[in-house]
C-alpha cells in the first residue's frame, strides 16, 4: 500500500512537475510582495486642514491635479512679477476680456489696482474657493511675512481677492484677477413709443453682475427711470423669482431724445446656480413737468400724478 | 530522450525545493515585525531619536490646534528651563536676522518677557495658508498681579511633525 502511494505520488510529480514549479514560483513572488508590504514604512505625511485645491464652498469638489499645478505656477509667476514691480509682464498674463472689463485695457488702471491689492505683501496663501465646470475660483490672501516679523508692531491682517482660472477647450488656462469671472453679450431690446431699453452686455464678477444698458428717450418729454421716489424702480429678477436691487442707487433721468449708457450692478454670487432671468425698470415715468427731487414733497407727488405715462419695462437677460 | 526528461524533472524538483526553502528562510528572518526597543540610556543620540520618534507618533494623533499649542509649550519650556540655545534654534531664520542676530541678544531679551514660571493662556488661533498665528496671554505665575498680562502673537510654520519654525511679536 505504501509503495502504491509512493508510486502514485511520484507519478503525480512527474506528470505535473512544470505546473508545480510554476505554482511554487507564483506563491513565492506573492509571499515576497506580502513580506515587503508588511515591512514597508510609508513616509509620514503631515496631515493638516489646509487643502489648497479643495473647494471651500463644496469640500467634495477639487481642482484636477494638472490644473492645480498650472494654477500654482501661474500664481507664483504673476505675484512674482507684481512684487518685483514688473507690471507689464503681470498684466500680460491676464485674459484679454479681463483686461477689457476690469481695467478698460489700460495698464495704469491695473497698476493702481495691483498696488492697492498687493502693496508691500511678502507672502500669499491660495485656497480653491469654488468650482463651476471649467472655471476654478481661487481666493488669494496677501500678507506681510508674518514669520519674519512675528507680527511685531503690527496686527494680523491681509488683503484678499478672487483670481479666476478658466480652462479653455484647447487646454490653455486663462487667468483673470479682480474677482472678474465672465462676460456675456446680451443685446436684448425692449421699446415703446417713449423709451428704448437696450441691454448690451453683462460682466460677471464673483459676487456681482454688472449690466451695461443703453436707455434712449424717444419722446419730447423728460423720462424718469430712477430717482428713489417710487418702489422697485430697477431690479434684477432671478430664475427663482427672487429679486435683487442695484448695489448702487443713482438717479437716472433722460432729457427729451437723450440717450444714456448706464452700468447697473446687482449682488449675485457666480457660483449661485440661480441665474438672472430679466432686468426690470419697474416705474418709468414720462413727465410733463419734472423739477427733480430737491423740491417740496408736494410738488414731487403732484408732478408724478400729472405724468403723461407710467409703465414698466422688462428685458430678458438670458 | 527518456533520460533527458528525467534530468529535466530532477532539475525542476531541485529548483522548486530551493525556492520553497529560500522563501521560508526569508519569511523567518524578515517576517518578524521589529518593535523599537528602548535604547541604552548612555547612548544620547539613540535616546533623542527614540524620544523624537515617540513624540512624532503622538503628534500624528493630534489636531492642528493641539499641535500648535504643543509647539508653543516646547518653545516656552526651553525658555523657562534656561535652554536658550534650543529655543533660539527653533526661531525662523529671517526673524532671527531681524530681531535677534545673536544668541546673546536673545538671552538678554527673554527675562524682560518671560519669568521662570509663566502662565500661558491661548486666546485664539488662525491659519493663513500654511502659517498659524496664535494669540497668547502671558502672566508671571509667581510674582504676577491680577491684570498684569502681556499679550503676544506667536507665528508658526510646521514643515512636518515636530519640525517647525517659530517667531513671536517682540514686545
Image: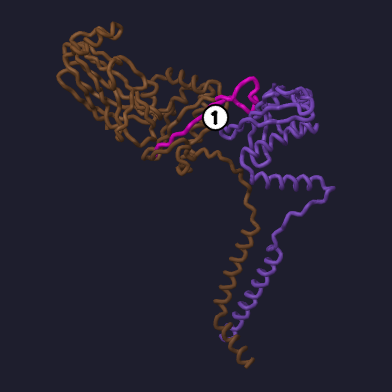
Chain colours: A brown, B purple
Q: Residue furthest bottom?
A: A1
Q: Residue at x 52, y 29 (%)?
A: A141
**Within-10-Å neighbours for mark 1: few <14, some 14–19, many 20+:** many
- B18 up-or-down from B157: above or below: below
Classify residue A284 as left or right of residue B24: left
Quadrant where the C terminus of chain B is found in the figure: top right
Residue A120 locus on image (x, y percent): 55, 21
Residue A96 visible in the current orientation = no
- Residue A16 at least partly seen: yes
Magenta stretch bounds: A134-157
Residue hosting label 1: A124
Residue at the image position 32 percent from the left and 22 percent from the top: A264
Query: Is residue B36 found left or right of A127 in the rendered image?
Result: right
Q: Position of residue A99 (x, y in %)?
A: 39, 24
Q: Left or right of B25: which side holds A45? A: left
Q: Position of residue A115 (x, y in %)?
A: 50, 19
Amino acid at each position: 500500500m505504501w509503495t502504491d502511494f509512493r508510486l502514485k505520488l511520484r507519478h503525480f510529480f512527474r506528470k505535473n512537475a512544470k505546473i508545480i514549479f510554476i505554482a511554487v514560483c507564483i506563491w513565492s513572488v506573492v509571499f515576497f510582495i506580502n513580506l515587503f508590504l508588511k515591512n514597508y514604512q510609508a513616509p509620514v505625511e503631515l496631515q493638516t486642514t489646509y487643502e489648497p485645491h479643495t473647494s471651500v464652498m463644496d469640500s467634495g469638489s477639487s481642482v484636477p491635479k494638472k490644473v492645480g499645478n498650472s494654477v500654482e505656477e501661474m500664481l507664483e509667476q504673476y505675484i512674482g512679477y507684481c512684487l518685483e514691480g514688473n507690471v507689464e509682464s503681470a498684466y500680460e498674463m491676464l485674459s484679454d476680456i479681463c483686461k477689457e472689463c476690469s481695467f478698460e485695457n489700460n495698464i495704469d488702471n491695473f497698476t493702481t489696482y495691483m498696488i492697492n491689492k498687493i502693496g508691500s505683501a511678502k507672502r500669499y496663501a491660495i485656497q480653491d474657493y469654488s468650482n463651476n465646470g471649467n472655471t476654478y475660483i481661487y481666493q488669494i490672501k496677501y500678507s506681510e511675512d508674518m514669520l519674519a516679523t512675528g507680527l511685531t508692531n503690527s496686527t494680523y491682517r491681509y488683503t484678499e481677492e478672487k483670481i479666476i482660472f478658466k480652462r479653455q477647450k484647447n487646454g490653455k488656462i486663462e487667468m483673470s484677477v479682480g474677482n472678474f469671472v465672465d462676460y456675456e453679450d446680451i443685446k436684448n431690446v425692449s421699446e415703446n413709443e417713449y423709451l428704448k431699453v437696450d441691454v448690451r452686455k453683462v460682466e460677471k464678477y464673483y459676487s456681482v453682475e454688472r449690466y451695461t444698458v443703453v436707455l434712449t428717450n424717444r419722446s419730447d418729454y423728460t423720462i424718469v427711470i430712477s430717482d428713489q421716489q417710487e418702489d422697485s424702480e430697477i431690479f434684477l429678477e432671478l430664475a427663482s423669482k427672487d429679486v435683487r436691487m442695484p448695489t448702487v442707487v443713482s438717479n437716472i433721468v433722460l432729457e427729451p431724445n437723450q440717450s444714456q449708457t448706464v452700468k447697473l450692478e446687482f449682488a449675485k454670487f457666480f457660483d449661485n446656480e440661480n441665474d438672472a432671468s430679466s432686468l426690470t425698470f419697474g416705474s418709468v415715468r414720462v413727465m410733463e413737468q419734472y423739477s427733480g427731487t430737491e423740491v417740496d414733497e408736494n410738488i414731487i407727488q403732484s408732478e408724478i400724478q400729472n405724468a403723461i405715462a407710467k409703465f414698466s419695462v422688462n428685458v430678458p437677460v438670458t | 530522450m527518456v533520460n533527458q526528461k528525467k534530468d529535466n524533472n530532477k532539475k525542476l524538483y531541485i529548483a522548486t525545493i530551493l525556492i520553497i526553502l529560500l522563501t521560508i528562510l526569508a519569511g523567518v528572518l524578515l517576517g518578524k515585525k521589529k518593535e523599537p526597543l528602548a535604547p541604552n540610556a548612555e547612548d544620547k543620540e539613540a535616546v533623542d531619536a527614540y524620544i523624537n520618534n515617540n513624540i512624532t507618533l503622538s503628534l500624528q494623533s493630534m489636531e492642528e490646534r493641539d499641535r500648535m499649542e504643543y509647539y508653543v509649550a516646547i518653545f516656552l519650556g526651553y525658555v523657562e528651563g534656561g535652554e536658550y540655545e534650543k529655543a533660539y534654534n527653533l526661531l525662523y531664520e529671517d526673524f532671527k536676522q531681524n530681531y535677534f542676530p545673536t544668541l546673546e541678544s536673545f538671552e538678554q531679551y527673554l527675562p524682560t518677557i518671560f519669568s521662570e514660571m509663566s502662565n500661558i493662556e491661548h486666546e485664539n488661533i488662525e491659519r493663513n495658508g500654511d502659517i498659524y498665528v496664535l494669540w497668547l496671554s502671558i502672566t508671571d505665575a509667581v510674582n504676577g498681579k491680577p491684570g498684569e498680562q502681556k499679550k503676544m502673537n506667536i507665528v508658526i510654520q510646521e514643515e512636518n511633525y515636530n519640525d517647525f519654525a517659530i517667531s513671536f511679536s517682540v514686545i
